[in-house]
């Protein structure tokens, strides 16, 4: 059984594309950034922490011994600065103004933990994200929808009304919150094969022609 250590609707939708049954069991951990922590180290620590927190659950929420716990953490980074979820509309406005018109990075770490023996596998994905020159009026309209308030960096790449990103050349699913090819690579190391063609399903669902899935899944150096 696959256990998704998240209650994110976006991660649930993406995980469905593997064609494997799963259930969601959200993790609750402290997501504070440690002093001097890099964006990559931050998401790795949180993904591992989420996986271990869910795998350790007992009582009515006990995780079956044969389960694989999947956890992920995504953050937006502008240089070395980590931009988490905005605390309010004003902070969302400030983040979107800061990111406008230039390149930043999105990092996601994926953890897969085998409950039977505690074996943990980790992988990371980093995507360069070029933001378009949206106006202050567009920012205000988007912030008023409430959508930015639960998003790292205060935006969703897939938002129909805002469309903040232009000419992306990396992993779109990573920016949404779950890089499926990286997850597939980890599952295969544990002899779990998705029931769907993951690159095809992901590109169809996100309406995006991915230029990097071959390098991630089929380059022998990355296996």
Image (cartoon, rainbow, N blue to C red):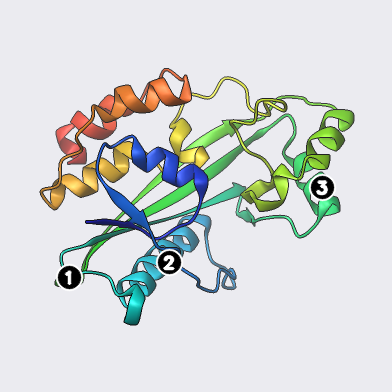
Measured as percent of width and height from the top left, residue 128 is found at: 53, 35
Q: Nearer the viewer, residue 83 or 191?
A: 191
Choose the circle earlier in sequence order: 1 or 3: 1
- Rendered view: 102 above or below 80: above
Quarter holding the N terminus is: bottom left
Question: Badge 1 local density, few (<14 within 10 Å), some, or many (20+)?
Answer: few
Task: Indicate left or right for 175 with 94 as reference.
Answer: left
Image point 23% across, 33% down: which residue? 217
Give the residue displayed 52% in from the left and 56% down from the top.
Answer: 39
Q: Could you say which quadrant of the image residue 6 lies in?
A: bottom left
Q: Splitting the image into 4 quarters, where does residue 173 fall?
A: top left
Name the residue beneath numbered marker 1. Answer: 65
Q: Position of residue 176 (x, y in %)?
A: 51, 39
Q: Quadrant of the image for the C terminus?
A: top left
- Please give the residue where the numbered disc 3 appears in the rendered image: 94
Say the numbered circle drawn on residue 45: 2
């Amino acid at each position: 059984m696959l256990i998704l250590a998240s209650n994110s609707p976006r991660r649930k939708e993406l995980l469905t594309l593997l064609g494997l049954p799963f259930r969601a069991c959200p993790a609750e951990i402290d997501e504070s950034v440690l002093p001097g922590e890099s964006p990559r180290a931050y998401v790795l620590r949180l993904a591992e922490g989420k996986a271990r927190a869910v795998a350790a659950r007992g009582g009515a929420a006990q995780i079956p011994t044969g389960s694989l716990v999947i956890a992920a953490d995504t953050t937006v980074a502008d240089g070395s600065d980590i931009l988490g979820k905005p605390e309010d509309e004003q902070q969302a406005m400030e983040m979107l103004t800061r990111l406008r018109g230039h390149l930043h990075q999105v990092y996601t770490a994926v953890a897969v933990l085998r409950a039977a023996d505690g074996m943990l596998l980790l992988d990371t994905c980093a995507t360069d994200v070029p933001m378009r020159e949206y106006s202050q009026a567009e920012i205000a309209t988007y912030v008023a929808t409430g959508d930015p308030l639960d998003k790292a960096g205060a935006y969703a790449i897939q938002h129909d009304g805002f469309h903040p990103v232009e000419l992306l050349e990396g992993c779109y699913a990573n920016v949404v919150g779950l890089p499926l090819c990286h997850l597939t690579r980890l599952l295969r190391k544990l002899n779990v094969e998705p029931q769907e063609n993951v690159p095809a399903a992901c590109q169809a669902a996100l309406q995006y022609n991915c230029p990097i899935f071959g390098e991630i899944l089929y380059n022998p150096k990355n296996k």
